[in-house]
Image (cartoon, rainbow, N blue to C red):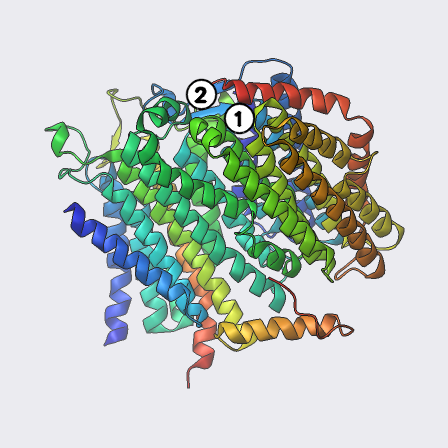
């Protein structure tokens, strides 16, 4: 059970990181969503083993799931949900203002905006 | 329950103001009044706690300590809370003077303040995560203020990078809970000694996540981008308030949950801090844009914090406290100056630059002096001192370049200088009358190092 | 046909949401999932019925009030008592004390806080989607 969960976390985390390295901003946003869910799954995995919900009356302590872990997981899910909604809204705004979803285009837009502000030194590359 | 009042008041007020249009004068005034009240309450709490009162503690729900979440407000919490609420009041006034253009601005500033106060007041690792997410998510929304192309780009980078940091923090917390079965700072100290090695990975992850929030090299990439793209008042709020979360987290965890780890990692901390300091200041000197320069100076300051953390002991913690105080005020002044015009702009920029460079008569001087003193006594001696001195010289160059850049440019938006002037005056005032503040900081630093069980 | 089904999905999702919220004190269920389920029902309206009908059906104009009201309810029940000197998140009635039942719902601070969260999540989902929708519609042929 633990091995399966660990594998699942690894796959989701890997998929998330892979998506975050893509050029499409929506893929990046999707990648962050996967990442936060992988972290939540990791949280849940630290409380594996219980079968019954932690609600009174408690039949046997060993069979009851750890309520603290569940509370942590729901909190993390809600926070991730809120951030994802915000991130998607910002991504949509990026798409609407720049008319592109490609990160390379955003970078060139940045360089163009920068050059527009400082016309006297077009050959100096800002170090990031 | 008085020390919890700032948290409760700002949270409730932020929630209430969400429903109303923040552009209306009455809403902005209400928010400013609340923020000012919160600042006053924080100052009172700080005076009590630095004057020797016992730390305030309460467990949520009245449950026994191991079951409930512990809230604890001691000198360190009050110190950071006062700095942050002070900066936030000034930012609110600054925006109020020109008219707010974003419906949610006052509510978001208040909610950010609530998140910060909660993070400073908590004694539980996961609760810390929740409150700092509250503060950080409010700042996400604020970062996009203005909805221009640049702001949206900056906000996107900021959100993605910060979310990654949060994920790392969460994984670290999961690891710690799995290994020790507790999340309470006080309970973690003995557990950390017992578990030792198995906590190495989670604590490293937490350190990485906090450094990312702080903007420490090599996780600093988002800082110059964001500081350049977002509106100056928002950046002032972030640099003067939000970044302090990272510093607070590092201090708090180093001296409670990860005490032993801090001693072992002192060398790494010193090296990272020195590297960040030099990298940030060298790059700052060559910037062409004042806001970006401010961003790199911020990276350098993050280096100071970690360097002082590596030095450790009362001297090191005192240095961090003073660096945070001076740094928050002068960076906030610097960014608010970008919105001012005329003589206020030049004067505020001059004061901010002088403080960043650590010149006498400004708050930065006390911080720099203490840092040099701490570095001179440190075990790693000459190298650390050399790094601090080199960083100081570079900062001097960067600060004056900042002053010239600001002097030669004009505000991006509408001009207003009153709040900036007040903040600049505070910087100078602290420089002239540093004694009481330093005394309070010494008391607080000793409390932290003694480990008065947070 | 899609539209008719979509129209009926919303009241059903509301019923399910209320059920999840109401039984949360005695069985598995809580305010967040209740708000999320109701919000999903609302979002289906936007996708299947078009902005105008959907906005009227889900009450998008009240989104901010739901968000603020829900948040204030939860905070007021859990955090505001701190101003009166009580530790935060103190529940009333205390554990093992007698509880007043209104039908199937208990009059307990935890239930009220959950209601606040459900309203908050529903208002947030519907409000965000309401703002997001016009761009999609504009782009359709």
Q: Can you tell which mark lies on residue B4?
A: 1
Q: Residue at x 42, y 66 (%)?
A: A21
Residue farthest to the bottom, as pictured: C141
Compared with B288, B360 (above or below) is above
Tags 2 and 1 on a common chain: yes
Compared with B305, B338 (above or below) is below
Which type of secondary structure does the marked residue at label 1 adopt? Answer: helix
Q: Of callouts 2 and 1, which one flags the residue occurring earlier in the amino acid sequence?
A: 1
Horizontal and vertical percent position of residue C91 = 35, 26
B166 left or right, relative to B400: left
Compared with B62, A114 (above or below) is below
Which type of secondary structure does the marked residue at label 2 adopt? Answer: strand
Q: Residue at x 36, y 27 (%)?
A: B192
> Does residue B235 appear in the picture of this structure?
no
Where residue C73 sits, quadrant-wise, is top left
Query: Dot 1: within a 10 Å radius of its alpha carbon, few (fewer than 14), some, or many (20 or more) residues?
Result: many
Front in this rendered view, residue A89 or B246: B246
CA separation in Å, label 2 and label 1 = 10 Å
Horizontal and vertical percent position of residue B247 = 56, 37
Q: Residue at x 30, y 43 (%)?
A: A73
Residue farthest to the left, as pictured: A59
Residue farthest to the right, as pictured: B343
Please state the chain letter of the residue tagged with numbered disc 2 in the rendered image. Answer: B
Front in this rendered view, residue B63 or B209: B209
Front in this rendered view, residue B22 or B300: B300
Instruction: Say whether marks 2 and 1 touch (CB < 8 Å).
Output: yes
B360 left or right, relative to B108: right
Q: Can you tell which mark lies on residue B58?
A: 2
C66 left or right, relative to A65: right
């Amino acid at each position: 059970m633990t091995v399966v969960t660990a594998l699942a976390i690894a796959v989701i985390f890997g998929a998330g990181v892979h998506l975050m390295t893509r050029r499409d901003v929506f893929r990046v946003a999707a990648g962050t969503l996967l990442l936060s869910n992988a972290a939540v799954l990791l949280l849940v995995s630290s409380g594996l083993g219980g079968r019954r919900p932690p609600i009174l009356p408690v039949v046997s302590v060993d069979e009851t799931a750890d309520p603290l872990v569940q509370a942590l997981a729901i909190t993390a899910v809600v926070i991730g949900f809120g951030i994802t909604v915000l991130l998607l809204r910002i991504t949509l705004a990026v798409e609407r203002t720049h008319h592109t979803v490609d990160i390379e285009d955003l970078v060139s837009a940045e360089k163009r905006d920068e050059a527009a502000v400082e016309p006297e030194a077009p050959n100096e590359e800002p170090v990031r | 329950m008085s020390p919890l009042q700032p948290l409760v008041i700002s949270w409730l007020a932020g929630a209430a103001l969400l429903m109303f249009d923040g552009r209306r004068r009455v809403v902005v005034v209400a928010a400013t009044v609340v923020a000012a009240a919160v600042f006053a309450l924080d100052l009172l709490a700080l005076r009590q706690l630095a004057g020797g009162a016992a730390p305030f503690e309460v467990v949520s729900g009245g449950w026994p300590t191991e079951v409930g979440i512990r809230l604890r407000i001691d000198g360190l919490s009050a110190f950071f809370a006062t700095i942050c609420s002070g900066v936030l009041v000034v930012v609110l006034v600054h925006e109020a003077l020109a008219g707010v253009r974003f419906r949610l601005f006052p509510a978001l500033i208040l909610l950010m303040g609530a998140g910060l106060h909660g993070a400073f007041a908590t004694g539980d690792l996961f609760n810390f995560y929740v409150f700092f997410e509250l503060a950080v998510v409010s700042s996400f929304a604020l970062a996009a203020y203005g909805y221009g192309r640049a702001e949206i780009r900056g906000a996107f980078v900021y959100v993605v990078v910060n979310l990654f940091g949060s994920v790392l923090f969460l994984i670290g917390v999961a690891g710690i809970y799995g290994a020790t079965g507790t999340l309470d700072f006080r309970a973690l100290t003995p557990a950390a000694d017992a578990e030792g090695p198995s906590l190495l990975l989670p604590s490293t992850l937490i350190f990485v996540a906090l450094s990312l929030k702080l903007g420490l090299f090599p996780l600093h990439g988002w800082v110059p981008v964001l500081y350049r793209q977002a509106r100056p008042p928002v950046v002032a709020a972030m640099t003067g308030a939000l970044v302090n979360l990272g510093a607070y987290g590092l201090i708090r965890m180093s001296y409670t949950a990860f005490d032993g780890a801090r001693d072992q990692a002192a060398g790494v901390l010193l090296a990272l801090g020195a590297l960040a300091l030099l990298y940030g200041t060298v790059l700052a000197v060559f910037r062409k844009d004042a806001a970006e320069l401010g961003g790199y100076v911020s990276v350098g300051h993050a280096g100071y914090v970690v360097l002082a953390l590596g030095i450790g002991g009362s001297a090191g913690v005192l240095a961090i406290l003073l660096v945070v105080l001076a740094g928050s005020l002068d960076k906030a002044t610097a960014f608010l100056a970008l919105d001012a015009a005329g003589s206020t702009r030049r004067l505020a920029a001059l004061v901010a630059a002088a403080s960043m460079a650590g010149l006498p008569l400004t708050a930065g001087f006390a911080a720099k002096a203490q840092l040099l003193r701490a570095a001179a006594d440190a075990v790693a001696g000459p190298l650390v001192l050399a790094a601090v001195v080199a960083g100081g010289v570079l900062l001097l160059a960067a600060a004056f370049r900042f002053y010239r850049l600001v002097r030669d440019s004009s505000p991006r938006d509408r001009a207003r200088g009153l709040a900036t002037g007040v903040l600049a005056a505070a910087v100078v005032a602290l420089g002239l009358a540093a004694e009481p503040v330093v005394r309070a900081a010494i008391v607080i630093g000793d409390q932290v190092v003694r480990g008065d069980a947070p | 046909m899609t539209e008719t089904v979509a129209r009926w999905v919303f009241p059903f999702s509301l019923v399910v949401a209320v059920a999840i919220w109401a039984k949360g004190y005695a069985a598995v269920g809580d305010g967040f999932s209740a708000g999320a389920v109701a919000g999903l029902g609302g979002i289906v309206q936007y996708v299947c019925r078009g902005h105008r009908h959907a906005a009227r059906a889900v009450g998008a104009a009240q989104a901010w009030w739901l968000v603020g009201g829900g948040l204030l309810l939860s905070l007021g029940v859990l955090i505001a008592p701190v101003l009166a000197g009580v530790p935060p998140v103190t529940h009333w009635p205390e554990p093992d004390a007698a509880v007043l039942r209104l039908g199937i719902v208990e009059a307990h601070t935890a239930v009220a806080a959950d209601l606040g969260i459900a309203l908050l999540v529903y208002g947030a989902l519907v409000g965000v989607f309401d703002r997001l929708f016009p761009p999609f519609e504009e782009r359709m042929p």
